[in-house]
Image (spheres, rainbow, N blue to C red):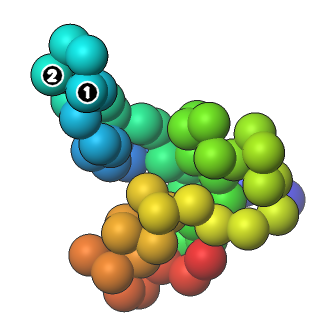
């Protein structure tokens, strides 16, 4: 069975030095929010980051 994956682009926080906004790709696999490319996922890989939680708040049909 082939799993379908797609990405959503979620806005991160502003860089204090440059003032630029950061954006992160959040991966969704079969309507399950599975991964994010932010630094928080590198340190705490098994807990959802704030970008994943924010995407879940916007799109409630997706599970974390």
Residue 5 on image: x %, y %: 59, 48
Left or right of residue 48, residue 17 in this image:
left
Name above or below for residue 23 compared with residue 48: above
Residue found 47% across the figure and 63% down from its top: 50
Q: Quadrant of the C terminus?
A: bottom right
Q: CA distance from mark 2 to mark 1?
A: 5 Å
Tell me if residue 59 can be seen. no
**Marking on residue 41:** none
Which type of secondary structure does the marked residue at label 2 adopt?
Answer: loop
Q: Residues within 10 Å of mark 1 (few under 14, many from 20)?
A: few
Residue 2 on image: x %, y %: 77, 52
**Marking on residue 19:** 2
Name above or below for residue 42 compared with residue 32: above
Q: Residues within 10 Å of mark 2 (few under 14, many from 20)?
A: few
Name, please, the residue furthest toward the front: 17
Residue found 33% across the figure and 81% down from its top: 57
Residue 16 on image: x %, y %: 25, 27
Q: Quadrant of the N terminus?
A: bottom right
Name above or below for residue 43 compared with residue 17: below
Left or right of residue 1, residue 21 in this image:
left
Which type of secondary structure does the marked residue at label 1 adopt?
Answer: loop
**Marking on residue 16:** 1
Name, please, the residue furthest toward the top: 18
Observer-nearest of 37 and 1: 37
How many numbered marks does the figure carry? Answer: 2
């Amino acid at each position: 069975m082939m799993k379908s994956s797609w990405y959503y682009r979620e806005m991160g926080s502003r860089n204090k030095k440059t003032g630029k906004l950061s954006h992160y790709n959040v991966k969704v696999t079969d309507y399950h929010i599975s991964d994010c490319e932010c630094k928080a996922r590198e340190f705490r890989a098994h807990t959802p980051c704030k970008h994943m939680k924010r995407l879940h708040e916007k799109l409630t049909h997706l599970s974390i």
